[in-house]
């Protein structure tokens, strides 16, 4: 598919969750197809962009990777403004990151509103031998939040594209016909990304890893 940076829709998506659950690598795997095994914890917020197609309409995704450390939470709360979708990420090998989901969910609903599209993501499913949180437990938690659920691996690229297809389709269906203006105060980077088709009919069936 040819590169296409034209768009009619602008969607702001944030990635939240505890530190070291793999948020930055989910972003870099999706926007750059890169994985950094020795990546450092995000300080403040990082931004990536991606151009996609949904039902034939061009959309630019602004994807915000937020810091997971407690001391940065008051800072990153301001980045919920204008948010259309949210990934809440935990590490399937880390029980504490799973226990923190409720706190992140409550903050997302408070700051972004009840209508924000949310997907719960259990990352690092390539580490099956170190698993502490079962897939069934993740699915149950997602149901309690009325959210979609995926297990992913940024390392092996399992379900990374799928979670973005899902959230963009959710946002598109929810916001059809609404005005969608770009926030001039938001810095845009990585402008020239390859467009991919996110038409709902082409979205694969949700599945977990391993």
Image (cartoon, helix red, strand yellow):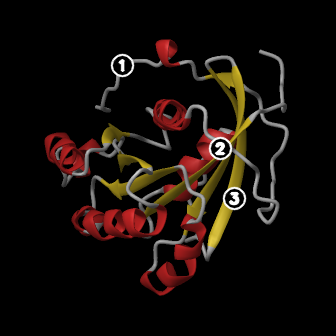
Considering depth in this image, is 130 or 143 the residue closer to the camera? 143
- Where does residue 86 sit, x and y in percent of width and height? 47, 52
Quadrant where the N terminus is found in the figure: top right
Query: Label 2: few (<14), some or many (≥20) within 10 Å?
Result: some
Give the percent coordinates (x, y) of residue 197. Answer: 64, 20
Tell me if label 3 and label 2 are in contact, CB under 8 Å.
Answer: no
Q: Is residue 24 visible in this depiction of the protein? A: yes
Judge whether 5 appears above or below 38 on screen.
above
69 to the left or right of 84: left
Where disc 2 sits, the SS reads loop
- Tell me how far mark 1 sits from mark 2, CA to CA: 24 Å
Left or right of 126, for residue 25 = right
- Residue at 66 percent across and 64 percent down: it is 46
Going from N to C along the chain, the mark reached first, 1 or 3, is 3
* Picture layout, residue 29 above or below residue 194: below
Report whether residue 37 is seen.
no
Q: Which residue was labeled with disc 1?
A: 205
**What residue is shown with label 2?**
34
Percent coordinates x, y for residue 56 in the rendering = 68, 17
Packing grade of label 1 (10 A; few <14, some 14-19, many >=20) is few
Q: Secondary structure at mark 1?
A: loop
Secondary structure under tag 3 reads strand
Whether residues under marks 1 and 3 lie with C-beta atoms below 8 angstroms apart, the answer is: no
Identify the residue at image location x=50%, y=36%.
Answer: 160
């Amino acid at each position: 598919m040819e590169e296409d940076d034209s768009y009619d829709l602008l969607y702001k998506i944030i990635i939240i969750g505890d530190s070291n659950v793999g948020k930055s690598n989910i972003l870099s795997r999706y926007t750059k197809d890169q994985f950094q095994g020795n990546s450092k914890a995000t300080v403040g917020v990082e931004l990536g962009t991606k151009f996609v197609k949904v039902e034939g309409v061009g959309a630019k995704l602004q994807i915000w990777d937020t810091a997971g450390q407690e001391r940065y939470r008051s800072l990153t709360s301001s980045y919920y403004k204008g948010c259309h979708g949210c990934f809440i990420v935990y590490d399937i090998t880390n029980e504490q990151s799973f226990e923190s989901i409720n706190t992140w969910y409550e903050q997302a609903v408070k700051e972004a509103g009840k209508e924000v599209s949310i997907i719960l993501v259990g990352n690092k499913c390539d580490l099956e031998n170190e698993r502490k949180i079962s897939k069934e437990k993740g699915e149950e938690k997602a149901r309690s939040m009325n959210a979609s659920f995926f297990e992913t691996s940024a390392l092996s690229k399992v379900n990374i594209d799928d979670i973005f297809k899902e959230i963009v389709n959710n946002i598109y269906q929810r916001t059809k016909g609404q005005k969608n203006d770009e926030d001039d105060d938001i810095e845009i980077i990585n402008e020239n990304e390859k467009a991919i088709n996110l038409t709902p009919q082409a979205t694969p069936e949700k599945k977990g890893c391993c």
